């Protein structure tokens, strides 16, 4: 029989994502609703090792549901990658009376959570918070929708300049291993070509597409490139190659970078974060542990952390077909 949960810790780890604050808020207020104590851990696993633990109550998280970033702050911890570091973290948790942990983050954060659970038999639940939407076992991760809308807005503005100057813009968006942002934002913003790490479309296909665009009368084009795309060493090398093998385009490169992480979370991300935060606390109360809580077909679900960390088998065939048709 599972031990009764009395005090839950919550931390954010890895890259920040819009909606993390909404998730923290939901965890804290669910604890308050169910008469449980809640401890906030500042600066992720690094803060856990350095004992940066603060009590949180319902009023501690007022007015943060609309804020980007994470008010608990986040950091990457090399020390937590060691058994000794995780032992320090575990000792700090037990010394403070925390008997379970909610980790909000991506695959690196979940790897750390799984190791903590395995080595010290400590109950953990992961909440997927990453703009890349690259976690297995959930249709959406917290922050993805907001980042997507930020990217579309940026591309719309760049297109105004591209059209005014008859330019070809290469726009790099985040997505080291997943092309969700690039593909969906590219379609939403009307990009002529979209390059993603899951599909090796080849540079010749890109050149042929640009040639067709010129022949059809297009004087400007937008190429959206996920940062993990493999056509070149980087987007600058790719743009230089295209410059040397095409005529008639004035080529520019724009790397959107960290603006994709910031900003107020969308309503979708706020609601998703709230559902998953409450669900995480309720799952711990029911004795669930060492799982990630996600959303599949609009239903909140639980999957083992090990499953969440496996490579996501996400086919983009339908969206690629739509992109090919609408970009002609």
Image (cartoon, rainbow, N blue to C red):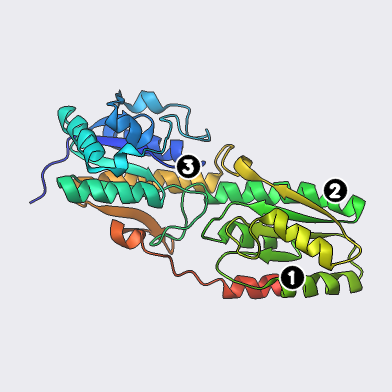
Closer to the camera in the image, 254 or 143: 254
Counting from the top left corner in percent of width and height, residue 284 is at: 22, 46
Check residue 79 in the rendering and tell me which mark sits there, or answer none. Answer: none
Question: Relative to residue 326, is residue 101 depicted above or below?
Answer: above
Report the residue marked by disc 2: 161
**Callout 2 crowding tier (Cα within 10 Å): few <14, some 14–19, many ≥20:** some
SS for dot 2? helix
Question: CB of mark 2 within 8 Å of CB of mark 3?
Answer: no
Q: Is residue 328 shown to the viewer in this render?
A: no
Q: Which of the two marks, 1 or 2, is nearer to us in this view? A: 1
Q: Residue at x 19, y 51 (%)?
A: 118
Relative to 246, 124 lies left or right: left
Query: Which numbered disc, 2 or 3, marks the residue that appears first in the sequence?
Result: 3
Q: How many marks?
A: 3
Return the residue found at the far left: 1
Report the residue marked by disc 1: 206
Check residue 15 in the rendering and tell me which mark sits there, or answer none. Answer: 3
């Amino acid at each position: 029989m599972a031990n009764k949960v009395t005090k839950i810790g919550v931390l954010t780890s890895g890259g920040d994502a819009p909606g993390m604050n909404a998730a923290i808020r939901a965890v804290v207020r669910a604890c308050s609703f169910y008469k449980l104590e809640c401890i906030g851990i500042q600066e992720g696993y690094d803060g856990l090792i350095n004992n940066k633990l603060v009590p949180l109550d319902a009023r501690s998280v007022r007015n943060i549901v609309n804020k980007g970033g994470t008010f608990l702050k986040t950091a990457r911890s090399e020390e937590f990658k060691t058994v000794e570091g995780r032992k320090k973290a575990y000792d700090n948790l037990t010394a403070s009376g925390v008997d379970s942990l909610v980790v909000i983050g991506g695959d690196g954060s979940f790897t750390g959570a799984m190791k903590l659970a395995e080595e010290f038999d400590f109950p953990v639940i992961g909440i997927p918070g990453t703009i890349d939407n690259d976690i297995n076992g959930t249709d959406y991760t917290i922050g993805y929708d907001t980042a997507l809308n930020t990217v579309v807005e940026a591309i719309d503005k760049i297109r105004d300049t591209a059209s005014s100057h008859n330019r070809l813009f290469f726009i790099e968006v985040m997505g080291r291993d997943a092309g969700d942002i690039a593909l969906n934002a590219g379609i939403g913003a009307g990009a002529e070509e979209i390059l993603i790490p899951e599909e090796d479309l080849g540079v010749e296909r890109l050149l042929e597409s640009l040639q067709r665009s010129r022949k059809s009368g297009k004087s400007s084009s937008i190429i959206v490139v996920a940062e993990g795309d493999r056509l070149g060493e980087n987007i600058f090398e790719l743009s230089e190659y295209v410059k040397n093998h095409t005529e008639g385009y004035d080529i520019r490169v724009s790397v959107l970078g960290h603006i994709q992480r910031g900003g107020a979370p969308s309503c979708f991300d706020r609601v998703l974060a709230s559902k998953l935060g409450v669900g995480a606390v309720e799952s711990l109360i029911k004795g669930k542990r060492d799982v990630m809580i996600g959303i599949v077909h609009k239903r909140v679900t639980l999957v083992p952390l090990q499953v969440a960390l496996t490579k996501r088998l996400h086919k983009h065939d339908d969206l690629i077909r739509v992109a090919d048709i609408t970009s002609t």
